[in-house]
Amino acid sequence: MASQRKPVIVRKFSRDWVAGYASMSFGQGGPELEILDLAGKVVWIRWETVKWLCYVRELSTATPGETNPERLNTKRFAVRPRTAGLWIRMTLNDGDELEGLAANDKSLVEGAGLLLTPPDQRSNTQRIFVPRQAIQTMEVLSLIGAAKRRPVAADQPELFTPDI
């Protein structure tokens, strides 16, 4: 049975961060994000202050005073990604740039934010949620996916004639 709370690291625009556990449906429609911190206390963080929310593999590497607990060393793809999705580059409100792969669905235009796959999938961060109010500009660099199938021509001859 999957856990109802996932380990996350919340990065704020003030450069400080909070490590803890967020529920799977963390109430993006509400004014605040609810986090159960490592001490077992419930912390409420206003969405306007959230830069991104990183779903991480483990929280044991997040120590107080650390500057990069989410281990986002690479924020851009070095080469064209191979995983299917939309390759997106966004500039956040503090001028920081971030690239990632997003699903090609209605979540790009609807919802409280974008869920991205980061460039370095071997890091501690598995997914990044960026709230809509944190995004200043967004650019779609490429659509990556299966090649389009060409339609079969209507006047194509039959190979075998049906027996009547």
Image: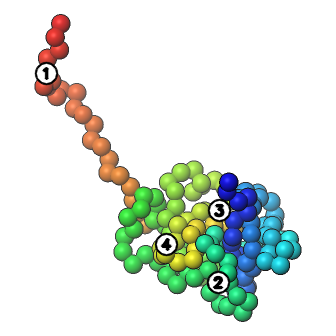
**Which mark is in front, 3 or 4?**
4
Q: CA distance from mark 4 to mark 1?
A: 50 Å
Q: Which mark is residue 61?
A: 2
How far apart marks 3 and 1 lie (CA) works out to 53 Å
Residue on which the image places disc 3: 113
Location of residue 85 in the rendering, given as x and y in whole percent from the top left corner: 46, 58
* SS for callout 1: loop
Q: Residue at x 18, y 26 (%)?
A: 155
Mark 3, Cα crowd under 10 Å, few <14 / some 14-19 / many 20+, is: some
- Number of marks: 4
Q: Is residue 146 visible?
A: yes
Q: Nearer the viewer, mark 4 or mark 2?
A: 2
Q: What percent of the width, then of the height, locates residue 13?
A: 70, 81
In the displayed structure, does residue 106 sit left or right of residue 3? left
Callout 2, which amino acid?
Thr
Residue behind mark 1: 160
Q: Residue furthest front?
A: 1
**Dot placed on the residue nearer the N-terminal end, 2 or 1:** 2
Residue behind mark 4: 121
What's the amino acid at mark 3? Gly
